[in-house]
Each structure stands twice: as structure tokens, then as C-alpha cells.
Image (tube, helix red, strand yellow):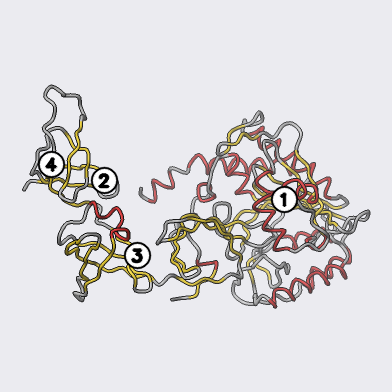
Amino acid sequence: MSAEEILAGKRAHLELRCRILQTIRRYFIEDGFMEVQTPLRTPAPAPEPYIEAIPADAPYFLITSPELYMKRLLAAGYERIFQITPVFRRGEQGRFHHSEFTMLEWYRLYADYRTLQEDCRNLLLTVCHEEGKASGWDYQGHWLQVEGEWQHYTVREAFRRFAGWEPSSHVDQYRFDGDLVEKVEPHLGFPTPCILSDYPSSQAALARLRHDDPSVAERFELYWAGLELANGFSELTDAAEQRSRFREALQMRRQQGYVPYPLPERFLASLEDLQPCAGIALGVDRLIMLLGNAGHIDEIVPFPPGFD
Amino acid sequence: MATLTTSDLRKGLKLEIDGEPYIITDFEFSKPGKGQALYRCRLKNMITGSQFDRTYRSVDKFESADLEEQDMQFLYSQGDSFHFMNTANYEQIEMTRDQVGDATNYLTENLVVSMLFFQGRPIGINLPNFVVLKVVKSDPGIKGDTAAGATKPATMETGFVIQVPLFIEEGEVLRIDTRSGAYVERVKA
């Protein structure tokens, strides 16, 4: 097949992408959100242990997420903001991964992760209705539907049920990630989406811990058809705590020989003014894969790696 | 031999594990958004054919398998030993019937095959996709059987028995697909 024929063959998926992007924008605008644009390059990516930023014209890196910029907007009083942006993560390449992919992020002041879970439900309902798939459809041999009760497990419940053990607050990440991928995820989100919530505190990332149970963080992931679609949390607004988590992550990065990042000082300074808030990132490509019954992420972008 | 990292892993890559050569027959990259990457591989032992699944992490390192391909000409067989000659340096090597495996069905004198060596030892033979073999025995087709696609057995010069169309006669030369063992066409002598 010629390159033109390959591209022409993707028309249905590219039109679906176009419609889903429009639906998402309309959904958030109608809900009173403001669309924002923040830089694609940053001098200080959020230090996270297993997310690698791609250097771009030193001292800059391509963003792995617009999170820090968006929270700086929140700290300045922008109450409801969303963004659809390319993000870049080094070395991620597979059926469900591209190292450049499209992220939808939205943030709410004075809200917590429960509100975000409601947002997820309303957003997916809207997208599926717009696509005429409200009553369900087949995804790669699995029946999916958005209507009806969604599954909801805490991380502890899901691991007890599917992996046969219960993660503690400082769980061994090696064992946790292995069983999450191989034993837990394959059960999540059939036929309705699934919320997996309350991650061990050692995996809080930028989430705040639960007041009533500090062994877990107010962090959740949205799964559908075994696929991780979104990660959201009640944001950590304690600057000292955030600084110490970043230092820990930077230390870990150093030990593993990764490129060092500077501490994101402007972001840390903005936390002093940040009110309670919540934010979430959703992988738009994966949502398009599900709605378009695509088995490989290459199918739903015009120019995947190797064809770029 | 080169040291490889998880970023080199892909379908078709050949690795040495516990002193044996393996090929990756299936590969999947998985990664929880905030977690560690998992590189899930199905590995096939290139000598025994046995398969197993293994999951690797970013810190894992690998040795590429010391494999080499050489064009070898089949000379003759004697009992269970098969003799080949390296077409580049004329060195001769001997393989057992077990090592040659199903390729014995297609080996005729002077046929050039691609032989795979692991650390200098022969471990397998890649045949050309098509070979030409002579029919040494085939009963005439049953008269009146005109059903389209009707076939009968024919014994080739190597002893290999395949299904051929009814019009094929003893002494004819046929093109055979070595991947499926199927008759392709008659070759004019």
C-alpha cells in the first residue's frame, strides 16, 4: 500500500478523532470551564520516578504533562480550566503507548477527587451518546457500555480480589506494578468503566493523603476494557510536603542514572496560594481506540512512529 | 556478542539466555501511567522449540545471541548423518537426522541451504521457499475420477510423500513449497 492509501484508509478513525475532540471541548465549555494553552517545553518537569521527559534544546524538556502550569493558573484563581495538548514521554512505545500522545487535563478549584469521578462519568456518557454508542458496542471482542453502574474498587480491594494480597502504605513498587499489570488490570472495566481509587501513600504522586486514612492517597485511575484511561487526584497543596516528595523522586532518579531535573521552584512557590483543588489527565488516544474499536494506537493517529 | 537493554526488545530479536539461543515471538510493552514499564515477552528456544513467557523491567540487561548464518551445500547422507559443505570456505560439517529435522524431506544433492550456527555449532536449517524434486513413485490416477482438485499420493526422490494432481506421472519433476510441503507446479525437464 502506498503512503497515501494508508492515510486514506484511516479516514473513519481520523473523523472519529475530530468528533471526539469537538465533543470534549463542547462538554467542558458548557460546564463553565475555560480552555487554556500552556508551554510544550519546560525547564523543570515534575520529578516523578518512572516518567522520563525528552530533552529539547537545553535547559528545556518537552512536557510530560501540563500539570504544573495548569496548577499555577489555579493558584492565580482560574477556577475551572481544561486543556487538550500533546505530551511527550521517553521510551514509551507499544500497542497502547506512543511517546508523543494527546492528553486531556482538567482542574477544579474547591473540589476533590470524587467530583472528578462524576466528571468522568458525565464526560464519557456525553461522548458515547454523541457517537451513538450509548447502548454499548463491541471492542476487540469485549462488550462495552457506558450506561449502568460503574465498577468501583479501592486499590486494596482490587488487589485482594485479583492478586490475592493487600498492598500496604509503602508497598514494594516492583511487585505492585507487576501484579497491577498482569493480575488486576485485565479485570477492570468490563463492560462498564471502573474507578480504582485510594492508592498507597507511597504512590501518591502529587495527590494529598486521605485525612481519615493517611496510608492511602486521594488518587484514582479510570479503567475501561482493562485499559488505563485517566489518572486523577485531590491535589496536594502543601508546599513543604510537595518539595519533600520531589526531592525523594529526584534522589531516586539520580540513583537510577536518569537525567537530573531542577526543582520546579515557581510551581512550588505557587502552592502557597493554591486553594483545595483536584485535577485529572485522560489519554485521548486510548478513548478514541475504544470508541473506534482499534486494537493498536497506530490505527488512530495519522502518522505513527515509523510512518512519521 | 552485545549487551542489550529493554529498549532493544522487539519481536524477532534473538537473545542468549542460560547459554541457549532464544527468539522473541511475541512482545508487549505495558506501563501503568505512574509506574514501572513492563516488557512482556514470549520466548522460543531456537534449538528445542520450547516456549515460555517472561516479563522484564527497565533495569534488565540482555546478551544478544551469537548467531551466524552460512550458505551450505548438501553433499550426501549416510544412515543418520547428513554432510554439508560451506560454500565460502569448503569446510565440511556433519549433522544428525534429528538436527536436520523435517528438512530431510527436501534435501537433494547440491541443494544450497542457509544454516544457522549458535556459538559455532549448527542448530538449524532454513530451506529455500521452493525446491525441485523428482517423482519416483505414483500410481496412475483412477480413471473416471474427474472431480476438480482430486489428488493422489506421490513419493519423491527423498522419500517424502505429497499429494499431487492426478495427471502427474512417475519421473516428472515438481516444484514444492517447503513451507507447506505442497505441490506447486510441474517443471519442464
Callout 4 environment at 10 Å: few (<14), some (14 to 19), or many (20+)? Answer: some
Q: Quadrant of residue B46?
A: bottom left
- State which mark lies toward you, 3 or 4: 4
Callout 2 environment at 10 Å: few (<14), some (14 to 19), or many (20+)? Answer: some
Q: Which residue is mark 4?
A: B137
- State which mark lies toward you, 3 or 2: 3
Name the subunit of mark 4: B
* Left or right of residue A262, residue B117 in this image: left
Q: Quadrant of the N terminus of chain B?
A: bottom left
Q: Are marks 3 and 2 on the same chain?
A: yes
| Callout 3: SS | strand
Q: Are marks 3 and 1 on the same chain?
A: no
Foreground residue among A299 and B42: B42
The spot of residue B110 in percent (x, y) is: 15, 62
The spot of residue A41 in percent (x, y) is: 65, 67
Callout 3 environment at 10 Å: few (<14), some (14 to 19), or many (20+)? Answer: some
